Amino acid sequence: MNLLLENELNSALVAVFEKNGLDKKFAFVKVSDRSDLSDFQCNGALALAKIAHKNPREIASLIAEELQKIDFIDAVSVDGPGFINIKLKNEFIAQNTDKMAADERLGCGEVDDKHKVVLDYGGPNVAKEMHVGHLRSGVIGESIRRIEKFVGNEVIADVHLGDWGTPMGMILAEIIKTDGNLDKVESYDIAQITEFYKRANIRCKEDETAKEDARKITAELQGGNPQYRKAWQHLRSESIKAIKENYEQLDVNFDLWWGESDAHETCGEIVKIAREKGVSEIDEGAEIIRLEESNKPKPPVIMVKSDGAFGYQLTDIATIKMRYDEFSADEIVYFTDSRQALHFEQVFEVVEKLGIAPNVKLKHIVFGTVNGADGKPFKTRDGGVMNLETLIEMSKDKVRQSLPKAGEVEGYGEKEIEKLTSQIAVAAIKFQDLKNTIVSGYIFELDDFAKFEGKTGPYIQYAIARINSVLRKAKANGINFGKVILQAPEERTLALKLAQIHNVVMRAHNEKEPSIIADYTYNLAQTFSTFYNACSVMNAESAELASSRLTLAKLVRDVLTLMLYLLGIEAPEVMLKAENQG
Ligand code: ARG
């Protein structure tokens, strides 16, 4: 059950509309754009008037008059062409706030139509260093995973490792070129493996025969050559180890560590199904599926290349079938940058054509790139790809500038400081990413992202830590939690803001957009700060007011903590902010 203030208001409106023979489709309110005038507004009279060719103000006045009689409504006015502005009674808002504080889910409801959703994010590749693009996919995906679970859906998160394409053949070819054979493969660690891949990449760009060799090896690897398979197993498991470490640092989690290779058998089935349905054809030795050309030409899907290797699209088509057959997924959502837009369009169209996952909702969420100050994809100082490791280290270095040194604060030795540093550094990286709408991309703000002020992760963590300190102090002074009383305007504004949590989470879920939560979190932290400056807990005018404010403070702390959790960010109990900061 959700604890939105709109619920009772909407039911009251429906009753008024029905009584007056008005279409109840328009009987709903939204949070007011003019908080100086009202808490909520209903614009239904405008729509009704248009249909009935009547004066909107007249209809609005009729509705307003009836609303005025309702006990939890304080004031109603008709403004402009026919907006109905509604202000609620303070006691009504206060009671709702009490209910939120007593609710495990802080007033946030679940979805009605719970379903099973597979999330496909991360998508790192064997033997390639992870870069900021894999960071975005991981950070966004992790947040969506938490949001989907929280609203009541069943979630399966799959990393979908890139482990079956031509790069596999490229790196095996490179090792053979260097060593003469694959005997030493199993002694290579991840650093050596990535080095081989880098060299292979350069070679294949310049040398057509090297590329041809790599393709041949890839086809044989997929075909089951035992020597290649054995070597590949090692590359794969070393890579997974390194990737897991990276994602662990970022608190990005998966339920499944499947890769493209796990779809191999199903790929074969898909090829058969396509033949049976008569949708595939042979073209220059390759087995392809042609697609409808709507407004722009769409290249065909190459299922099987002329050398017998399976194409990237086919692995994704087969994986959808597996997710449908094995998990009965209702929805599958992918998170990659825009370069794969065509890929998923093609994949989804073939899945539809083959009828292998009927009624499954397939969605590709495209995110913008992470750029440097020059507007180009974010690079290291020497122009290299910005990998995750470097990024996390950079962020930690920034955070260290704001924290005391190990041993300077009692109970905070090397280990504790390091843990706090990484909690704050990860918050800085993730919040900077998630505060932007997914599609827009952003410039990595090297100077500000780890500061304890402004719209940053550490600022929200700091706001939480400040409230923790208020709670500790109140406890030491014998102040208890009590019923919420709303007197000062700052108290009222804060309570109204808190009551929006359900809508915020539902919008983030519906739109698959964590920035909605990030925005709300920042606004709530600011609203709290204004409240706390005006309304002291420790020096409140009465014991009741102190207890009420303490309840509000704790509720804000809990909502902020939950919101950070949904963004994939931890909230440390204290922040040990050094004195020289803000
Ligand atoms: N491995 C791919 C890459 O790095 C991303 C995978 C995206 N997910 C998928 N199911 N194809 O570009």
Image (cartoon, grey):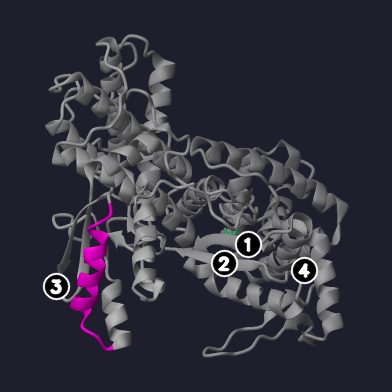
Q: Is residue 432 above or below residue 23?
A: above
- Mark 3 residue crowding within 10 angstroms, few (<14) / some (14–19) / many (20+): few
Q: Position of residue 473 (x, y in %)?
A: 26, 15
Q: Position of residue 322 (x, y in %)?
A: 76, 60
Q: Position of residue 484 (x, y in %)?
A: 28, 32
Mark 4 or mark 2, which is nearer the start of the sequence?
4
Q: Is residue 330 visible?
A: yes
User: Which residue corresponds to the image point at 13% horizontal and 55% vertical from the top-left?
Assistant: 36
Tell me the residue that label 4 is attached to. Answer: 309
Measure the alpha-carbon separation of dots 2 and 3.
41 Å
Part of the protein shown in magenta: 53-70
Measure the alpha-carbon separation of dots 4 and 3.
67 Å
Q: Is residue 26 above or below residue 280?
A: above
* Residue at disc 3, secondary structure: loop
Measure the alpha-carbon separation of dots 4 and 1.
29 Å
The residue nearer to you, when weighing 552 against 5, is: 5
Number of callouts: 4
